[in-house]
Amino acid sequence: MTLTFNQEQYTELLIKYQPKIIETEAEYRQALAVIEHFVFKKERSLEELALYDLALMLVKDYESKTCLMDDWRSQSPTEMLQYLLESSGKRQSDLVGIIGSSGIVSEVVNGKRSISKSQARKLGEIFQVSPSLFI
């Protein structure tokens, strides 16, 4: 017997659980509750498995972001910027015109100039992390 995915049932599950990108600890706990519900359910439909997989992905994404932030809270903003540049494959020159001139970028990256709130916001957008890592 071949099981088929029922789009209507999946839509009903999406309406009931309303999964979304996790941004808060409360949303994280709510997503974990959804996962736990499906883990302990004896028989799961294809639609429930799809929602379970989606919830897992959302939780993993949130955990990867919060773990990065937790691990780097002890690092200086300059060290964080240097790490993100290196790990992303970006260069100082990629920041020129975004956070300032080449001289300003060099001073920021080398810790000779602090990162302003405006620059932190732009860096947060570039590296897709919280701007608070740079302040």
Image (cartoon, rainbow, N blue to C red):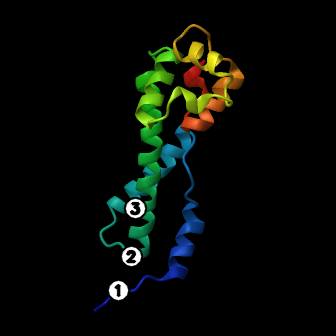
Q: How far apart are the two marked residues, 1 and 3, measured between alpha carbons?
A: 18 Å
Q: Which class describes the residues within 10 Å of circle 1: few (<14), some (14-19), or many (20+)?
A: few
Mark 1 and mark 3 lie on one chain; the one further toward the N terminus is 1
Q: Position of residue 23 (x, y in %)?
A: 57, 42
Q: Position of residue 34 (x, y in %)?
A: 45, 56
Q: Amino acid at mark 2?
A: Leu
Q: How far apart are the two marked residues, 3 and 2, measured between alpha carbons?
A: 10 Å
Q: Is residue 27 left or right of residue 98?
A: left
Which quarter of the rendering shows the N terminus? bottom left
The quarter of the picture where residue 103 lies is: top right
**Local secondary structure at mark 2:** helix
Which quarter of the rendering shows the C terminus? top right
Residue under pointer 2: 46
Residue under pointer 3: 53
**Relative to 111, residue 117 above or below:** below
Residue under pointer 1: 3
Residue depicted at 54% across the width and 10% down the height: 111
Please indicate, yes or no, whether residue 130 appears anywhere in the rendered image. Answer: no
The quarter of the picture where residue 70 lies is: top left
Residues at circles 2 and 1 in contact by the CB criterion of under 8 Å:
yes
Relative to the observer, which residue lies in front, 112 or 1?
112
Mark 2 and mark 1 lie on one chain; the one further toward the N terminus is 1
**Local secondary structure at mark 1:** loop
Mark 3 and mark 2 lie on one chain; the one further toward the N terminus is 2
Residue depicted at 38% across the width and 54% down the height: 36
Q: Amino acid at mark 3?
A: Asp
Relative to the observer, which residue lies in front, 62 or 9?
62
